[in-house]
Amino acid sequence: MQIAEAYDRMPYPSKFFYLTNPDHLATLAVLFGLEAAPPQECRVLELGCGNGSNLLAHAYTNPGAEFVGVDISKGHIEAANASANELGLSNAKFAEMDVADLARDEFGEFDYIVGHGLISWIPEDVRDRIFSVCGALLTENGVGFLSYNAHPGGRTREMVRDILQHHTRGIEDIEQKVRESVTLLALLAEDCIDTKVVKHIYRREFERHLDHDVSDIFHDDLADDYHPLYFKDFCALLERSGLQFLTEAEFHTMSLLPFSPEVREFVETVDDLIEREQYLDYFRGRVFRQSVFCRKAVTLDRSLPASRLEGLMVATTLRPETEPLDLAPEAKVRFKGNREQGIEIDHPLTKAAIAIAGSAWGRAIPLKELLQQARHMVESAGFPVSAPESHEATTLAIILRIFQGTDLLDLHVFCPDASQTLSERPRLNGLSRWQLGKSKNITSLFGLNVGVEDPVSEELLRLADGSRTVPELTSEMRSFIQSLDDIDDREDLLARLDEWVDESLGSLARLGVFEA
C-alpha cells in the first residue's frame, strides 16, 4: 500500500508534541552557545505534519511566528487547512506534497525544521533525501528535530512486527488487520514457552498497545516501511548533508545518572560524543530517539557553563514536601514533582528559588527575577545572603544539574503570556476547545500539554465555555456524573464534588488553560 493511500484510508490521530516547540529547541541551542531565532518571531517547517495538530498548537501559542506543514496525504492536508480556518490562524499554512521534494526556491529557509515519527516509516531513499532537505532549508543558526526508532531496541520491535505482518498478510481491512494482530500478540504474551527472553518481549509489546488507537498500531507497527537506525548511522546521514548532532530533545536522557558506576567509568573513557551516545544506546536497549541537530559549520560549546542559564526562564512542578519551608543553611528539604519523583536540596537560595518556581507552575519565571525573589525570601527568613554572586552561581549550577539529570524542571527562552486567574465564568481557550474530543490531551496558553484522561474531566472542560459560573458548573457536573453507567467511584466523587470542581478549576487555571 502506498504511503499516501495508507494515510488517506486511516488518518493518523491528533497528537501534540511539546518537544518540537520552537521555544524548547531554542533553549537547547542556547545551552550549547548557539543563538537560535526567537520562538515568538521565527519560521517553522514540519515534515510529515499529518492533520496539522502539532503545528496548529504551536501556531496558536506563538501568533507572531510563521508555521508551514507538508504531508503526502491529501486527507491530512485538507483537515489541517480546515482546522487552521476554524481556529482563525493566519500564521499556519499546509501543503500536500512529498516532503522529499521541498525546495528552498519555493519555500525559503526555516529557523526550525521538525519531523516527528517520520524517517523510520518511509522508504530509505526518501529518508536520505529528508536529510538533504534539512541541509538545504535550515538557516545558518537553525535547529532541527527528527525522531526515529533506534537500534538496538528497534530489533525487538522489528521481530514482533514481522510476526504480525505474516499473520495478517492476507487481510485488507485495516481494523480487522489491527484486531487480529493484537489478538495474536496477546496470545504470544501469555503462552510463549520461552520465559527467559522472548515472552518478556511479547508482553512488553502487547502492554505498549493497550492504550494505542487502531491508527497508531496500523501506521507504527504494521506499515510496509520500517527502518530503525543506529544513532551512529543517523549522525552519518546528518554529516553527509552538512549537519551535526546537537543534543537529545529529552535532555536528561543523555545523563549517566541511571547507570552503574562500572558503566559510567567505561563510557567516560570514550571521548567521541557520537561513539559515547551509541554505547549508551547499547546499555539502555534504546528503542526511540528524538534528536536535535544544527549546521555542521556552527561551533558549539559543550562545556555547559551554568552562567549560560542567566537569560533563561525556569518552570517546575517541584514543591517542598513539608511546610513551612526550612531555609536554614545545611537543612535538607525534599522537593517532590508531579509523578512523586523527588530531590533533596540544602542550599538556602536554591531551596527558595525552587519553591517559588514550583508555586508559579505552569508559568516560567525569568531566572534573574527568580533569584531576586529567592534572595528576598531567604533574607526575610533571617538568613543574610553574603557574597550573593557566589550563592547565585551555586543556584544556577544546581538548576542545571536538575535539568541535565531529570525531567523535574524545564528551561525556556520564552513563555507566552497567559492568565492564571480563575474568572467568575471560566472559559476554556479556543485551541483547547477545538482539541477536546480529538485527542487525549489539550494545550494550555503556556504551551503545556494537559492530559484529559477520563470522561468526567472532559465534561468539566466542555462545560467551561464562559457561560456558567462555578456553582452552575458544579450543578451540571453533578447531573452528568449521576447519568453515567460505568463509573466506579460515583458516590465518593459526588460527596466531594464541590471540592473536586474547585481544585480542578484552580489547577487548570494555574496551567493557563482558561482565557482571561
Image: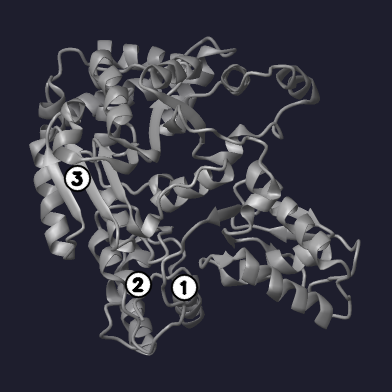
Mark 2 residue crowding within 10 angstroms, few (<14) / some (14–19) / many (20+): some
From the viewer's perspective, is 340 left or right of 76? right
Residue 322 locus on image (x, y percent): 77, 69
- Residue depicted at x 71% and y 20%: 267
From the viewer's perspective, is 493 left or right of 430? right
- Residue depicted at x 40% and y 22%: 238
For the residues labelled 3 and 1, the Cα–Cα distance comes to 30 Å
Q: Give the mark nearer the N terminus: 3 vs 2.
A: 3
Q: Mark 1 falls on what kind of element?
A: helix
**Contact, mark 1 vs mark 2 (Cβ under 8 Å):** yes
> Residue 460, which numbered label?
2
Task: Report the amino acid beneath label 3.
Answer: Asn
Mark 1 residue crowding within 10 angstroms, few (<14) / some (14–19) / many (20+): few
Mark 3 residue crowding within 10 angstroms, few (<14) / some (14–19) / many (20+): many
Residue on which disc 1 sits: 504
Q: 293 or 474, which lies in front?
A: 293
Residue on which disc 3 sits: 51
Quadrant hosting residue 470: bottom left
> Which corner quadrant holds the C terminus?
bottom left
Q: 390 or 449, which lies in front?
A: 390
Q: Is residue 311 depicted above or below 98 in this figure?
A: below
Residue 61 seen in render: yes
